Image (cartoon, rainbow, N blue to C red):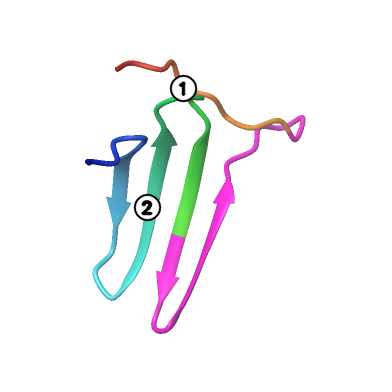
Amino acid sequence: MANDRFEKIYTQGILTTTEIWVDTETGVQYMWHHDGYAGGLTPLLDREGKPVISSVQK
């Protein structure tokens, strides 16, 4: 079964990478940053502290 819930919409870097992912069910955007053996995932927030939401297209 394929997991198509998340879609990568942006990537930058090779050894140190930053990616933007979208949850295709909710539209919430997440930033993933990876450097060496460490990495982190966080939702992108607007000025009011609310999650950035894309239009959901399936």
Q: Which mark is residue 19?
A: 2
Q: Dot 2: what SS?
A: strand
User: Which one is in front, 5 or 51?
Assistant: 5
Q: How many discs mark residues in the rendered view?
A: 2
Say left or right for 47 vs 3.
right
Q: Dot 1: what SS?
A: loop
Q: Please state the horizontal and vertical placement of residue 5, each as a whole percent of the image.
A: 36, 35
| Displayed quadrant of residue 51 | top right
| Residue labelled with disc 1 | 54
Q: The disc labelled 1 sits on which kind of residue?
A: Ser
Q: Please state the horizontal and vertical placement of residue 33, each as a whole percent of the image.
A: 45, 63
Q: Which mark is residue 22?
A: none
Residue at image position (54%, 24%) is: 53
**Residues under labels 2 and 1: Cα distance?**
15 Å
Give the quadrant of the C terminus. Answer: top left
Q: Please state the horizontal and vertical placement of residue 21, each as a whole percent of the image.
A: 40, 42
Q: Is residue 3 shown above or below 55?
A: below
Say left or right for 11 vs 38.
left
Give the quadrant of the N terminus. Answer: top left
Residue at image position (28%, 76%) is: 15
Residue at image position (39%, 58%) is: 18
Q: The disc labelled 2 sits on which kind of residue?
A: Glu
Which of the marked residues, 2 or 1, is nearer the chain's N terminus? 2
**What span is colored magenta in the figure?**
33-49
Q: Is residue 28 shown above or below 56?
A: below
User: Which one is in front, 32 or 14?
Assistant: 32
Q: Please state the horizontal and vertical placement of residue 39, each as a whole percent of the image.
A: 48, 71
Residue closest to the far front: 1
Crowding near the residue tagged with mark 2, few <14, some 14–19, many ≥20 C-alpha atoms within 10 Å: some
Residue at image position (48%, 50%) is: 31
